[in-house]
Image (spheres, rainbow, N blue to C red):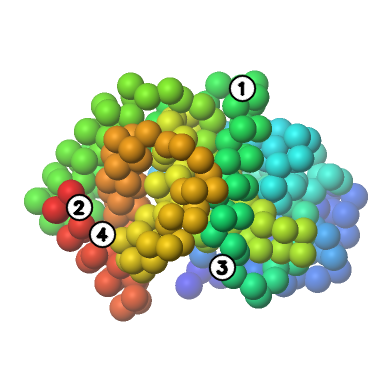
Amino acid sequence: MLSTDLPIRAATATAIAHGITPDRCNILQNGSTLVLRLTETLVARVVQDRDGPRQGTAWFARENAIAQHLTLQGAPTIPLHPEMPPSPHEHLGYPLNFWEYVTRIAAEPNPAEIGRTLRQCHDILRRFPEPLPKLAILTESLAILDERELFAKPTQQMLCDHLATSIEVLSHYPHQPLHGDAHMGNLMNTTRGLLWTDWEDAFAGPVEWDVASIIWNAKFLDEDHAMVKAILDAYGPVDETALQQSLIGRAAVMTAWYPILYPNPNADRQEKLRRRIEWLEQA
């Protein structure tokens, strides 16, 4: 694992430059993104994968703008830290942004609350004033597969075909700003309630994309049909054709990114990857 010394230095120096003196350095997450708690209220996210597909701070700027809009409108989301400028930061070559610390609770989120809060975020996102790239995570994933050989040729081609079809089909549905990566790992049950986080993949597309993202694992890996029904009932009506195509596109996106996010996957991740590929082969 890469040393965290430089990313930590980048985060602490940036905080100090804006008048906040860190009094701790608790590592909350250490992966392609390093998440650090630097004070009672300040959390820094630092991109450690500087050779990854995403370079620069443009996508952090988009995330910050989305998060600020949602916070001002009272959406259930983790807010940016109010004492740091809302623009993205970069120091020592590391892109960073800064968030308020929230306290996680152990209770599993209520499925109906998942659907309700996602719908609430979508309703507020419709008023987001800035243009977002259309179907960005799908077009980005297709571009990655065009540039890199990540799988055996038949699997690589299958993923490209599914992504191209999803882009074509979903382009004909109404688009609005979305979370873009609305899975359970980007949802936190906290003392402030259920909060959505990690808006870096935000793009314009049909709402069914986010709905498909939040139900995919429960529907196909866990076969928790009661949870899926509760989320869908609480969210409200969706277009079934758009949802089905989004489920296929979501599986293709997750698969395409797996070798990048998990270059040395453990047995559980290998099994999940195998099952997604198998499902896509039958889709």
Whichever of labels 1 and 4 marks the residue nearer the N terminus, that label is 1
Instruction: Evaluate if marks 4 and 2 touch, with contact meaning CB atoms under 8 Å apart.
Output: yes
* Of marks 1 and 2, the one in the foreground: 2
Q: Secondary structure at mark 1?
A: loop
Residue at image mark 3: 30
Inter-mark Cα distance, 1 to 4 = 34 Å
* Of marks 1 and 4, the one in the foreground: 4
Inter-mark Cα distance, 4 to 3 = 25 Å
Neighbor class of circle 4 (other Cα within 10 Å; few <14, some 14-19, many 20+) is many
Q: Secondary structure at mark 3?
A: strand
Q: Amino acid at mark 3?
A: Asn
Residue 276's disc number: 4
Inter-mark Cα distance, 1 to 2 = 34 Å
Residue 56's disc number: none
Q: Amino acid at mark 4?
A: Arg
Inter-mark Cα distance, 4 to 2 = 6 Å
Residue at image mark 1: 130
Residue at left 71%, top 51%? Answer: 78
Q: Amino acid at mark 1?
A: Glu
Residue at image mark 2: 280
Residue 162 in the image: x percent, y percent?
21, 41
Residue 275 in the image: x percent, y percent?
24, 65
On the rendered structure, is 105 left or right of 94? right
Neighbor class of circle 2 (other Cα within 10 Å; few <14, some 14-19, many 20+) is some
Residue 241 in the image: x percent, y percent?
29, 35
Instruction: Evaluate if marks 1 and 2 touch, with contact meaning CB atoms under 8 Å apart.
Output: no
* Of marks 3 and 2, the one in the foreground: 2
On the rendered structure, is 29 left or right of 201? right
Whichever of labels 1 and 2 marks the residue nearer the N terminus, that label is 1
